[in-house]
Amino acid sequence: MTSSPRNQVEINLNALQENCRAIQKRVGSDTKILAVVKSDGYGHGMIPSAQALSEIGVNAFGVGEVHEAVSLREAGVKGDIVIFLGARETEYEEVVHFGLQPVIFDVRQLETLASFAGSKEAQVGVHLKVDTGMGRLGVMPAELEKYAAVIRKEKGLFFAGLMSHFPCADSAEFTSTREQNELFGKLSAQMTGADQRFPLHIANSAAVIRSSDLHWDMVRPGLSLYGCYPSEECLDLVDLKPVMSFTTEVIQVKDVPAGFGISYGHTFVTSRPSRLALLPVGYNDGFLRSLSNRAHVLVHGKRAEQRGRVCMNVTVVDVTDIPGVQAGDEVVLMGSQGEEEITADEIAGWMGTINYEVLCLFGNLNQRVYL
Ligand SMILES: *Cc1c(COP(=O)(O)O)cnc(C)c1O
């Protein structure tokens, strides 16, 4: 017999594939999908996610760093792999060997990569990133031509793409996103003259979902593949299914009187005789302390309220109104049970954060099981 954790994150790869098909339908068959699988696939497992997407024809992936791309290649993933955070000089060997495509935002990086690729008689595809208003990575528009000139001149490099990123594509205010997109179009037109046509890409999930004007040649969805919406502005425009669920089980059930303080600091005191269920989950598993006295969980298809402080690996819930709960019963922390559902958005609201963070926390801190 082998033991296994009681807390399990379940990943439904069919839902991942369906979400990807829904997005492909939204952008049309002429627009390529670059599936973002950084941060271990937003907690869903980078390799299984990329393999499931490869199966349905996705042939471009986005990761943060070179080591992630190397893991993908070693797992047999083919196609373009774009390295959003660029490559270090010590990694150029791997960039060439595995045919990876770094994003360029630094001139020294561009020159050293060019000379390395030249010395190996290799051709490295690079994506030049321009800051059209994100205020993060990327070269400023005025410097763009200087970079483009190097890429055109160097035999070791080819233009795999011009890219940018939106800071506010998920917000109600959409004018700034449209203006940024116009600037992106203008800059690319200025560069295209002397060059062959190269792919343009700027859209994250919110932009993918909200407007076809923002799609260009390729789109870079992340969150939406995993079945969540970047914001309320994106609801109803595409049908997505959650890919991740998170479950645990009851380890003790006990009856306590009214006026009984619960967990560290007694931040909750019972107002009636109560039945409590103890769960072996806490902030070490991503069930953060900020959920204390806020979260709900599902037991026997009903909502049970969390009581007192969430501890490192124990949480208390109130099951007074749910008959028959016993040790060993399944508890859903995120996902559906019976008619009820707790979404990543709802949990994010209780935690004071965004659904992206909930997925990364739960998925990357717990054992994953694939369906
Ligand atoms: C993470 C990331 C994305 C995906 O964003 P979502 O909002 O998850 O769709 C796209 N592009 C870049 C450069 C990113 O870093």
Image (spheres, helix red, strand yellow):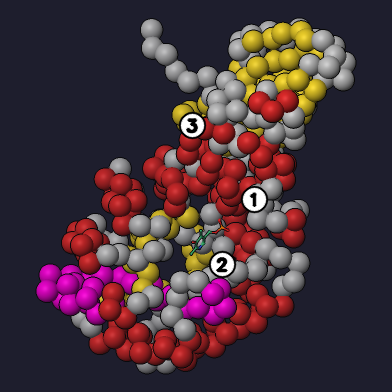
Q: Is residue 123 above or below residue 190?
A: above
Mark 1 lies on residue: 354
Which residue is rendered at x = 46% and y = 59% of the image?
A: 34
The residues tagged by marks 1 and 3 sit, at their Cα atoms, a distance apart of: 19 Å
In terms of depth relative to the viewer, which is nearer, 234 or 312? 312
> Residue 63: image x %, image y %?
41, 56
Q: Is residue 213 above or below residue 243?
A: below
Q: Is residue 271 above or below residue 358?
A: above
Examine the image and state in which quarter residue 298 appears: top right
Residue 366's disc number: 3
Does the closest atom of ligand 1 sit within 8 Å of the Cβ of label 2? yes
In terms of depth relative to the viewer, which is nearer, 144 or 215? 144
Magenta residues span 110-135
Which residue is rendered at x = 65% and y = 82% of the image?
A: 179
Mark 2 lies on residue: 203
Q: Nearer the viewer, mark 3 or mark 2?
A: 3
> Residue 233: image x %, image y %?
74, 60
For marks 3 and 2 on the same chain, the one whose residue lies earlier in the sequence: 2
> Residue 114: image x %, image y %?
22, 77
Residue 247 appears in the picture as rendered: no
Q: Is disc 2 placed on a helix, strand or loop?
A: strand
- Does 113 appear in magenta? yes
Examine the image and state in which quarter residue 148 appears: bottom left
Disc 3 residue type (three-letter): Asn
Q: Counting other residues with Cα less than 10 Å from the Cα at mark 2, is it few (<14), some (14-19), or many (20 or more)?
A: many
Disc 2 residue type (three-letter): Ala
For marks 1 and 3 on the same chain, the one whose residue lies earlier in the sequence: 1
> Residue 184: image x %, image y %?
54, 81
Q: Nearer the viewer, mark 2 or mark 1?
A: 1
Disc 1 residue type (three-letter): Ile
